[in-house]
Amino acid sequence: MNFFRSAVIFCQVIDNYGDAGVCWRLARQLAQQEKLQVTLWIDNVQALQRLRPHLDPTLAMQECDGFTLCRWDEHSVPNVEVDMVIEAFGCRLPSATITAMAAMQTPPVWINLEYLSAEKWVEQSHGLPSPHPQYALTKYFYFPGFSQATGGLLKESFVDSNRSVMNNDAHHRRAFAQRLGFMLDPQSTLVSLFCYPAAPVHALLDALQTGTPVTCLIPEGVAVDQLTAYFSTTPKVGMQLQRGVLTCLITPFLEPDDFDRLLALCDVNFVRGEDSLVRAQWAAKPLVWQAYPQAEAVHLDKLQSFLDCYLSDCDAHAAQIMQQFARAWNAEQSTELDWSSLQAQLPHLQLHALQWCGHLSFQTELAQGLVRFAAERKQTPSQ
């Protein structure tokens, strides 16, 4: 594979930070782990700046974590004289870019990196070619997933060691908690909450008030309207909001690697979309996923497919409780959330989360798999 050296990623930020976060992680992984020369073209540098505050959104080009970051707009002229071109999540390449690829003696391998899903059809669609109707170009569909028949998941080489430190080093745990503005309480269940605006936050906060103490960590900017209405105050970083046995702490919006540490620190993680779902699985802690809401409740099918996959080897009763809770959390209408039953199953769910993380680790890592997949389809000039 020594002839395979470079890649370009195109990213259009549709909503929130997930698209930018996944593409940033992929670019960093391809550059740092796979040693490729990587350029990431993104149409919303401001969204990525939220994750990497050192970035300057006014620059057309800058260096970022070992790769080149470029602002993608109507004036851009991307250089695609590379080995691999990645369309993230079905974004459309400019027609001039496709024409330039077709004119090359050895066109790059063209890949459409799709959204993550546990649905069964993904395994049949992964790797399928799509010939261009006009040019001698082929685009390949590459699906992340949870089995060897898919493209796998992004995972950096340091994930396991960082998780181990967070779980086993008491000093490190205390120091990180203090950075976030609170003291660890061994008698309190530590929960992180990262959700979309439509989540039934009021129902969750009501449920968390019953039973044993709970500390809920909420990043700034998440569920602001609902928290304002619930506590009759606008949440700000550092605030501790109390109700019964529940303490909510508003934490800073963390950079991605610190967000991973937060997930590893907590006992239960509420996560949303794609990027934080993957990171929560590497944290090896019980998770409750909110799927990105879609028309006609399509996201509920994706949720069920994931739950069936994720909980397939879990204790049957614990799996049933988690299924019920996750479906209620994703319901379009407000419903009661049975936190006490879920909390009672946390020992089973914790063991399962650790085993599931180990299972996923046997898959081919996504960036590594992408390079292997593309290199197998790359034509050399002599061909």
Image: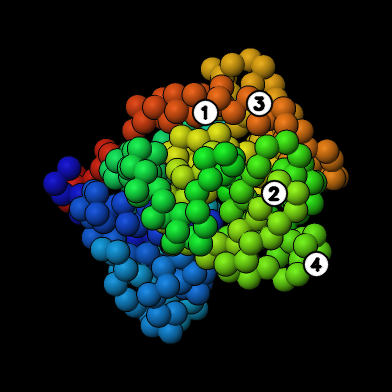
State the residue position of label 4: 232
Residue at 29% x, 45% y is 158
Relative depth, front residue between 156 and 123: 156
Horizontal and vertical percent position of residue 109 = 33, 49
Question: Can residue 64 be spotted in the picture?
Answer: yes
Disc 3 residue type? Answer: Ala
Which of discs 4 and 2 lies nearer the camera? The answer is: 2
Residue at 63% x, 70% y is 236
Dot label at residue 350: 1
State the residue position of label 3: 344
Q: Using a 10 Å C-alpha cutoff, classify the residue at mark 2 as few (fewer than 14 neighbours), some (14 to 19) or many (20 or more).
A: many
Disc 2 residue type? Answer: Leu
Horizontal and vertical percent position of residue 140 = 43, 43
State the residue position of label 2: 246
Residue at 24% x, 54% y is 32
Residue at 80% x, 60% y is 230
Q: Earlier in the sequence, mark 3 or mark 2?
A: 2
CA distance for labels 4 and 2: 16 Å
Which of discs 3 and 1 lies nearer the camera? The answer is: 3
CA distance for labels 3 and 4: 31 Å
Horizontal and vertical percent position of residue 266 = 51, 43
Which of discs 1 and 4 lies nearer the camera? The answer is: 4
Give the structural element (helix, strand or loop) at label 4. Answer: loop
Give the structural element (helix, strand or loop) at label 1. Answer: helix
